Image: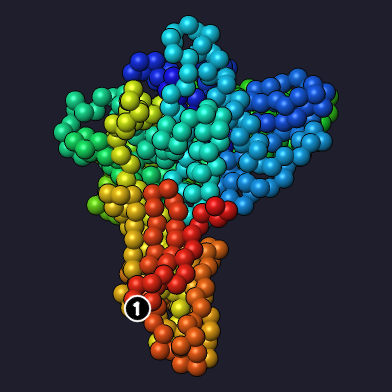
Amino acid sequence: MIIGIDFGTCYSSAAIMNGLIPVTTFLKDSTGMGVPSLFMYSQEEGREMYGEECETGAAFRHSSDIIRYMKRTVREDPANLEKTVSSGGKEYRLSEVIEKYLTFLINEIRTAAIRSGEYANNEIEAVTITAPVGIASGQMMASEYNRLIQEAVMRITGLPKEDVRVLQEPVAAAVSYLYSQDVRTHYDGIQKILVFDLGGGTLDVSIVEHDPATMEYRILAKEGDLELGGNDWDAALRDRIMEKVGLKWQGTPEETARFVKVVTRTKVELSDADESVVVFTMNGQDRFTRISRREFEDCTSHLLERAMDVMQRALDFDPECAPDRIVLVGGSSNMPQIARGIIERTGYAPEDVCVYEPSKAIVKGAAVFAKLNHASDGSAVGPRVLDMATLTYGFDSRYHGERECIYNMIYKGDRFDEDGRIIRKSESSFIPLRDNQTVVTFEVYESEFSREDCFEENWIDMGSGETYNGLRVSVQVPPEYFGKARGFHMWATMSLDSNGILDITVTDAAGRRLAYGSTALGE
């Protein structure tokens, strides 16, 4: 069995390759949006619960025990992986909850596939799991998340590292779209696709380039908003409903849980209908109102504008990277206002803005990618993904020994080479500030700076909007330079790989390594 997994903020999906076709129907999914990304320990049941179970029966009375938004919590801060979360009187590490949920998801699809009788080989041969193009404020933080999910899937399945791949979500969507449309029969040259992925909790916009001759997928631009997703449209709709009935919400926990489902259902209905009837219970009393699609779009217009601004930043990143087509994925892209807003903002023809399997595109692309990269002899035969740096990276220094600055080395948009790395060496040497100095520290900062922002090549003033990313290395000044440290010269080399691992190496004039630091914390 070859499996693709889309671990989402609000919903997750799994697809299994049936020959050359990615199939998602093996997985129990009553909503069509995937399996809710939920976990809880039920004291009443005396067991752990997953997915839809957390939204039914006794779980409604204990909604505060439900652990939600696991993925977004990690994206906000990778340190949250070790955060302790409580459910039903039990405590778990968030990384433990994520692994338990992935175990549940993999077991569900494997059991269902075996039960179908369509597979002679019931063993899992390869898995591709999707991940965002960047986590939190930097590419380096993606490595922590990617490593977590890759190693978790390896433990769950018993597969070696080469058979468990992590694929960027926009690339998965592009693979799915191109594969399903058999685009190779339609064009011979390079195709650029903007992937607009509006999920339940986050928005990611990327431009992906596909070369059918080399089977390469290159990420040309990527932007996102970690705090904008379908849940924000739900919240605005909820507030509008309360405004229409003239009340503030004061329902019981069970009523609250049911009301959340009513709001979501209303949002879905307004994707196809001009009006929806809203009936819910608050403090034991039934409430009733009607809401139109126009009202819904009016109360969420600020969210749409915010989403369009994210997309515009991706389009403006490199004017020469104008996409040939815009592909909308993610469950929340079903809302008509999204496609209409994109058409109005970009001027693209409606036929070039495609809502493509919003809830399934990414997971199907993951399964296809796993298939294309897996041969019976275990060799890699499929497409390659060529990424770009998400942010600019440099270290603190003093310009001419006086002006406190950052010396940038890797810039946002720099392309990874054929080996999946970006390596930059400082063009000049660096010396201690004082002759009596015995230790020199290099602290790495990340930012949105471009080369054009520098007042001199690679130099920018400290305090211009940079963020310290936690990577620091220290160099001991050799004893022979004590008292004359300013005569000691050092060179810095910074490397970023396509897994999001950033490191810095400091060498002396002879090329000997004096210090090394990596973002692979804990290894």
Please indicate, yes or no, whether residue 499 appears anywhere in the rendered image. Answer: yes
- Between residue 165 and residue 5, name the one nearer to us: 165
Residue 311's place in the image compared with 447, above or below, is above
Name the image quarter holding residue 287: top right
Please indicate, yes or no, whether residue 296 appears anywhere in the rendered image. Answer: no
User: Which residue occupies 59% across, 46% down?
Assistant: 74
Residue 409's place in the image compared with 253, above or below, is below
Q: Which residue is mark 1?
A: 509
Residue 523's place in the image compared with 198, above or below, is below
Direction from residue 305 to residue 416 in the image, left or right = left
Direction from residue 255 to residue 18 in the image, left or right = left
User: Which residue occupies 44% across, 19% down?
Assistant: 1
User: Which residue occupies 21% across, 34% down?
Assistant: 212
| Residue 218 picture location, percent across and down | 30, 44
Secondary structure beneath label 1:
loop
| Residue 394 picture location, percent across and down | 43, 68
Name the image quarter holding residue 366: top left
- Between residue 364 and residue 281, name the one nearer to us: 364
| Residue 411 picture location, percent across and down | 36, 62
Name the kind of residue labelled 1 in the image: Ala
User: Which residue occupies 47% across, 69% down?
Assistant: 515
